[in-house]
Image: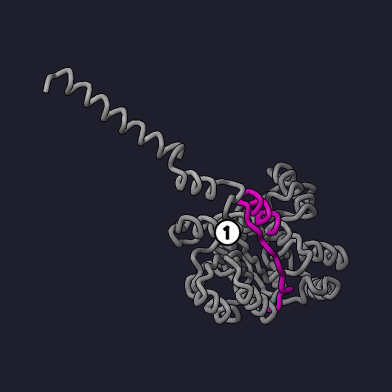
Amino acid sequence: MSSDMRGSRWRGLVGLGLCAVLVLAAGCSGGKLAQQKQQNSGGGGGHKYTFALISHGSPGDSFWATVDNGAKAAAKQYGVTVNYQASGGDPNKQAQLVNNAVAKHVDGLIVSLANPGALKGPLQQAENKGIPVTTINSGSDVYQSVGALTHVGQDETKAGEAAGRQLSSMGLKKVVCVIHEQNNVGLQDRCNGTKKTFSGQLVDMQVTGTSDVNSTVSQLKSKLSADSSIDGVLTLNPDIAQAAEQSIAGSNSKAKLATFDLSTDVLKGVDDGKVAFAISQQPYLQGYLPVVSLYLYKTTQNIPGGGAPVYSGPTVVTKANAKAVLQSVQNGTYG
């Protein structure tokens, strides 16, 4: 064979190879690949998944409204459906909502893990039926025990440690840590973490909570009136922070107020000095990221973080950055 013929043949093979690569990349004659690319693209072409988001929060809670906003944004981007339900702080009701979702054969579950014992059985049923689970918010240290793929939230103990350092820097001596939900491991971790780094005395106080804000206001008011040595109140929820503000004013206490989690009112309070600081776990991410995680797992078997927790916080909001954060909170994209 002449060198010209060999060269011509080689150029032909190269051309065929290049054409094959271009076909595979573009999907021009590879119909299956093109279809797969379309199915996996944003907008959910071909994938009509339904995920259930079930929290221990109360209906109308500003924190969980932000979580829901994040989930809805991700659902729109990926072309899936996310149905949100809140159990109002009732572990048994949350367990029943999970059971109902499993019975409906949802494609994935996103569950807050404030009470792992109540949810372990229902989540085991989900695993038995091949329904992937991502936990959020509380439970960063126990999510693997219920079979969850991953967890999105903050390390509540470390968040508490951040609060303790802030309180110490303010020179406070005796602070009440207001726990608004019984048996919520995440809330207790926040108080315990604060105790680790706070140079003063931290006292836990159980209140009725968001289900009866008026009772919560009365309980805090009585506590502050009875003990004038309390110079700080640390709440674990933005709605309870508003209740605490009323209690402080009503008892003529000089206690400084700080809180976990954000709302428009909390940020306005931080900006005008009525609230010393707020610890944010960025709930928008706690809604958005689990939807992305479940979608990726269903379509590609990828697990963001490799199964390790994906931390959404904590961040500390003070007067210095309150205005900037407020804009995002008003847009429902921060919290």
In depth, the one of 293 and 5 nearer the eye is: 5
Q: Amino acid at mark 1?
A: Pro
Quadrant assignment for the N terminus: top left
How many numbered circles are shown?
Answer: 1
Q: What residue did someone put label 1 on? A: 290
Residue 112 position, x and y percent, is 62, 68
Q: Residue furthest right?
A: 250
In this orientation, does residue 79 appear? yes
* x 46%, y 61%: residue: 308
Q: Secondary structure at mark 1?
A: helix
Q: Residue furthest left?
A: 1
The stretch of residues the image draws in magenta is 68-91
Q: Reply above or below: 188 against 290.
A: below
Q: Reply above or below: 272 against 172.
A: above
* x 50%, y 56%: residue: 299
In this orientation, does residue 166 appear? no
- The color scheme shown is one colour
* x 46%, y 55%: residue: 300
* Residue 211 in the figure: left or right of residue 81: right
In depth, the one of 169 and 146 nearer the eye is: 146
* Residue 274 in the figure: left or right of residue 190: right
* Residue 225 in the figure: left or right of residue 63: right
Q: Quadrant of residue 203?
A: bottom right
* x 68%, y 60%: residue: 260
Label 1 environment density (alpha carbons within 10 Å; few <14, some 14–19, many ≥20): many
Residue 113 in the magenta stretch? The answer is no
Residue 335 position, x and y percent, is 69, 54
Q: Reply above or below: 228 against 92.
A: above
Residue 81 in the magenta stretch? The answer is yes
Q: Residue furthest top?
A: 4
Residue 145 position, x and y percent, is 48, 75
Residue 210 position, x and y percent, is 78, 70
